[in-house]
Image (tube, rainbow, N blue to C red):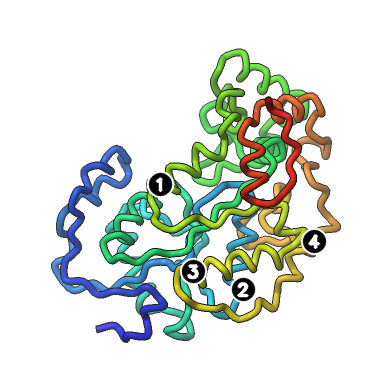
Amino acid sequence: MLPTAREHHRCFRAKQLDFEGAERYQSFSDATSVATSSFAAEPLSFCLPAVDLVGYPKCGTSALYKLLTLHEELIPWGSRKEACIVDGGGILSWLGLMERSALEGGSGDDKLLVNGCFGLPHVTTQEMLFRLYEKPNVKIFVMRDLADLLWSSWNFWCDIKQEDGCIAPAMWTRMGMHRRSPEYFHELLMKSAAEGSRSFRNVPAPQEMASYFASWYEPVAELYSYDITVYAKETLTKDPDFVWQRIDHAVQTVFNRKLQPHTSLHMFTEVLVNTNDQKGAKTGTKMDEVSEGLYKISGYRPLLQESREFIEKSWRECSMWSKMTGWAYNCTAA
């Protein structure tokens, strides 16, 4: 049996995993194997992550993951930032990864495991495991100014359905291959508005912008009995101490455990992770080498002011997120 000390590690040993009522999740085609009532004939040891990043892409999740795993009491749950149930072999391979995490639990049994997979099929299926063992965990949701997010995302990712040379799974834009400019973005923005639906990846119509983050956050929030910790991406570079205090409070609330002070917070005011010009969760770019909203692929030219104003007027949930995060966004939507 696993040592009692691994309670902090959220590790378990089971003869059989019974997912009663799992059929309600079968709409997620990549996770249908979870409906199997028994798939572990032999004893299985596994660990669930204690801290989960549940959103939102291009909102500083890579930097937050680094902040968490630099702390001496928090360690990566898998070999990569996003260890997802729905990747590759589905839940069976994911349980295999959990079994390995039980054996490779870092330098001590008192560590808390961190995972950065925020796909909705993943968090929904994983929640079934949490409920089965009645083990809540810390969930963190990050968001940012919507105009900045859409401009950054459009420059960062290509559209595999409409652009040549868009290679899965990363689907990163490439210089000389993918066309990017402030004028072209505005053209696509107006096209989405006229058609009432996305004309291009990361270029939504106004009705989608109205509740852009809530459409992701609310389905995830409804799964959990504990509140999700929410903060603004902008806060991490301006006040990482505030971000850490929120995370520490969440750990105390869920695990009744006080974390030691974080000794590397200063680096998040000096270095950016996974930028548009230096992609990848393991990259780092000095802050003074980056200008917010200026990207090489679009000629280091900013988002057009008319595009920004159009997005701001469409972003009806803006005031709600300002209140939740404490960050003063420019909320102009009626």
Task: Point out residue 154 in the picture as x, y percentages from the top left corner.
Answer: 65, 35
Q: Relative to 113, is 166 on the left or the right?
A: right
Q: Quadrant of residue 306?
A: top right
> Residue at left 30%, top 65%?
134
**Nearer to us in this view, 60 or 80:** 60
> Residue at left 44%, top 47%?
220
Question: Which residue is outermost to the right?
Answer: 288
> Which mark lies nearer to you, 2 or 1?
1
Query: Is residue 163 visible in this depiction of the protein?
Result: no
Q: Earlier in the sequence, mark 2 or mark 1?
A: 2
Instruction: Say which amino acid is labelled 2.
Output: Leu
**Nearer to us in this view, 34 or 206:** 206
Task: Point out residue 174 in the picture as x, y percentages from the top left corner.
Answer: 67, 40
Mark 4, secondary structure of its residue = strand
> Residue at left 47%, top 74%?
112
Q: Quadrant of residue 331?
A: top right
**Nearer to us in this view, 332 or 150:** 332
**Nearer to us in this view, 284 or 236:** 236
Per the model, the C-alpha gap separating discs 3 and 1 is 19 Å
Q: Earlier in the sequence, mark 3 or mark 2?
A: 2
Say which residue label 4 marks: 286
Instruction: Say which amino acid is labelled 3.
Output: Thr
Instruction: Say which amino acid is labelled 1.
Output: Glu
Mark 1, secondary structure of its residue = loop
Say which residue label 1 marks: 222
Say which residue label 3 marks: 253
